[in-house]
Amino acid sequence: MFNYALTMPVGDILLKVVIEGLAAGFIAVAFAMLFSVPKRYLPYVYLGGAITKALRTLLFTGFNMDVAIATFIACCVSSLLFVYVAPKLGTPRPVFTVASIIPLVPGMDAYTALLAMYKVIETGQQEISLYSYLIIEHGMRCIAILLAICLGIAVPPLFFYRYRHGGM
């Protein structure tokens, strides 16, 4: 089902993972600052964003895994990491997880799908088949990644918080 063979030289993969991880950490911190996350938590947000994006890049680029599955796994790891860390810091888990997954949002796919929709409206019947393909391909990938993000953040804590309030 999956081809886990490395698709690029190992050095190139590691360089890409490190660069994207470092950049994603800055994006996560910037988003956290927009929502007034206290300064003392920003290093944790940085690490969460960097780890999440680096893991997705490693799985997607290095092991040729589907981007939605790689996103789901990366979000699960991020969520599980902060299930452990957040209570130790006395802070709700979403303070960290929401900002950490922002670098995974599929901006280019959404942009490409919307641009193709605009082109269909603008050109009419002339090149509708090409643009329809772009709308479907990028739109479905965008939806799959967003679903993977939602499930990856929401599902793992259910296993740890099930009995927290005296449930069965």
Image (tube, helix red, strand yellow):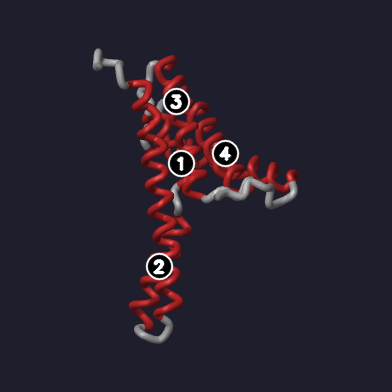
Q: Give the residue displayed 38% in from the left and 16% down from the top.
A: 90
Q: Quadrant of the C terminus?
A: top left
Quarter of the rendering containing residue 88: top left
Compared to residue 95, the image places residue 161 above or below, namely above
**From mark 1 to mark 3, how far is it between C-alphas?**
15 Å
| Amino acid type of the residue tagged 4 in the rendering | Leu
Q: Residues within 10 Å of mark 3 (few under 14, many from 20)?
A: many
Circle 4 Cα neighbour tier, 10 Å, few/some/many (<14 / 14–19 / ≥20) = many
List the residue tagged with mark 4.
55
Identify the residue at image location x=57%, y=38%: 55
Tag 3 and tag 2, C-beta contact below 8 Å: no
Q: Secondary structure at mark 2?
A: helix
Q: Amino acid at mark 3?
A: Phe
Give me the C-alpha separation between circle 1 and circle 2. 23 Å
Q: Which mark is residue 72?
A: 1
What residue is pinned by disc 2? 135
Q: Is residue 13 above or below residue 74?
A: below
Label 4 vs label 1: CA separation? 11 Å
Q: Amino acid at mark 1?
A: Phe
The local crowd at label 1, few if under 14, some if 14 to 19, many if 20 or more residues have their Cα within 10 Å, is many
List the residue tagged with mark 3. 82
Left or right: residue 147 compared with residue 43 = left
Label 3 residue SS = helix
Cα distance between the residues tagged 4 and 2? 28 Å
